[in-house]
Image (tube, rainbow, N blue to C red):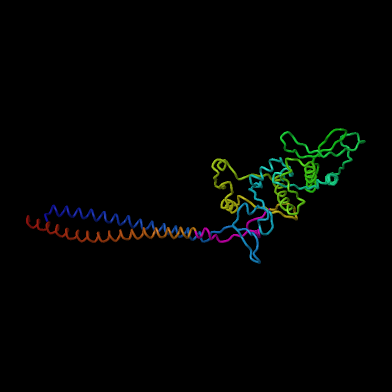
């Protein structure tokens, strides 16, 4: 091999050795990145092992308590929670989160309980319309109880000269829209006056609403006749009280629905799917404290704030669903990382073999070049 050819060959081998070492270094960095990714996958998996979900008591199988994953419908439905409590959901301002159906019923009645219940198919009053005298007497008695509770009676003459007694007229005012505006009337001196609500307590309000409901039933108004399922039926008393409690809470604290423009346009939002509130969204909002729970107290006759940790009907348990999903994902990710690692090891092994071959060739060529140089110096010395 000539000196020039030997030098060229030596430079070529040196360049290949450099490339080999650079590729080996890149693969070593890739292997380090794989180690970091593996560590992240392991951390994600370990975190998932401590994932929890909220469940609600739904009943008992003998002495064994049954729990179901929490959802808005389960928490706020009628007799859906096993402990028998009634719950409402609020935002941090105290406004009640209600369904679109409840909101529309409330707005239809403009804050009137009887309209609200009628829109939902119920009534707080029932009459035996087959006996008109008996029915009329029931209505008189109901109004008499209310009027006495506010210090009045049918004999009060608020509009006349005090000599004429008012004649109670069972008229339920209906504007042209066909929706009643919520008051009965009495007639005095050929003038009709509304019997407005003048009470200040819940008891007085209930007496007034009951009397109004009976008055509606006596008139058998066609707008409500087909819808009313009366409270006097024992099977309906519970659900009517359930709706009454919601109505009172909406009246006192305001309300809102979790439907926005995107739900109207595409019927898909982060909180809704197909018009139904997502259980996962609802649960996350509760965990983050953006939604709060209140349960009804029969003693206080009001909803009282409760917490996830203090409520006996709610428990936080290991989330088997999440753990199973992440475990499957973890196994797939680890398998993919191991394949990458194996490919890198093969590449490194090939580079190591190539590096050894190049190093051997480099030493051989270098020896030839060194001898040629030494021979050339000896010839010209």
Q: Residue furthest bottom?
A: 63
Asked where in the image residue 164 lies, by quadrant, the reply is: top right
Taking 149 as reference, is 264 left or right? left
Q: Is residue 296 above or below residue 133?
A: below
Where is residue 300, by image quadrant? bottom right
Viewer can see residue 240: yes
Magenta run includes residue 323: yes
Q: Position of residue 324 (x, y in %)?
A: 50, 60
Residue at (22, 60) in percent of width and height: 357
Of residue 6 and residue 170, the one placed in the foreground of this image is 170
Q: How many numbered circles are shown? A: 0
Whether 326 is among the magenta residues is: no
Residue 278 spot, x, y in % from top left:
57, 50
Horizontal relation, residue 227 to residue 347: left or right: right
Q: Residue at x 35, y 60 (%)?
A: 342
Q: Which residues are the magenta region?
A: 305-324
């Amino acid at each position: 091999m000539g000196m020039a050819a030997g030098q060229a060959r030596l430079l070529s081998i040196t360049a290949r050795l450099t490339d080999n070492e650079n590729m080996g270094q890149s693969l070593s960095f890739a292997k380090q990145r794989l180690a970091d990714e593996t560590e992240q996958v392991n951390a994600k998996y370990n975190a998932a092992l401590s994932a929890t979900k909220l469940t609600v008591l739904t009943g008992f199988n003998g002495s064994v308590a049954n729990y179901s994953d929490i959802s808005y419908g389960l928490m706020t439905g009628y007799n859906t929670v096993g402990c028998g409590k009634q719950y409402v959901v609020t935002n941090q301002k105290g406004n009640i989160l209600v369904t679109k159906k409840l909101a529309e019923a409330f707005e239809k009645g403009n804050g009137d309980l009887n309209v609200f219940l009628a829109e939902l198919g119920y009534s707080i009053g029932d009459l035996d319309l087959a006996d008109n005298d008996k029915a009329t007497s029931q209505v008189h008695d109901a109004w008499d109880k209310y009027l006495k509770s506010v210090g009045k009676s049918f004999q009060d003459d608020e509009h006349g000269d005090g000599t004429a007694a008012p004649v109670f007229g069972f008229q339920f005012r209906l504007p042209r829209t066909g929706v009643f505006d919520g008051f009965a009337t009495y007639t005095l001196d050929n003038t009709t006056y509304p019997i407005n609500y003048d009470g200040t307590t819940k008891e007085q309000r209930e007496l007034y609403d009951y009397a109004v409901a009976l008055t509606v039933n006596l008139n058998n108004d066609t707008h409500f006749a087909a819808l009313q399922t009366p409270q006097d039926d024992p099977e309906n008393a519970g659900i009517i009280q359930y709706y009454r409690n919601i109505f009172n809470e909406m009246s006192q604290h305001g309300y809102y629905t979790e439907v926005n423009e995107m739900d109207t346009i595409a019927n898909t939002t982060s909180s809704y799917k197909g018009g139904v509130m997502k259980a996962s969204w609802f649960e996350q909002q509760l965990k983050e404290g953006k939604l709060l729970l209140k349960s009804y107290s029969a003693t206080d006759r009001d909803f009282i704030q409760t917490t996830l940790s203090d409520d006996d009907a709610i428990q936080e348990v290991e989330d088997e669903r999440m753990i199973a999903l992440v475990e499957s994902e973890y196994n797939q990710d680890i398998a993919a990382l191991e394949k990458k690692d194996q490919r890198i090891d093969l590449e490194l092994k090939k580079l190591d073999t190539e590096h050894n071959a190049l190093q051997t060739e480099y030493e051989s060529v270098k020896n030839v070049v060194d001898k040629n140089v030494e021979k050339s110096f000896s010839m010209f010395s």
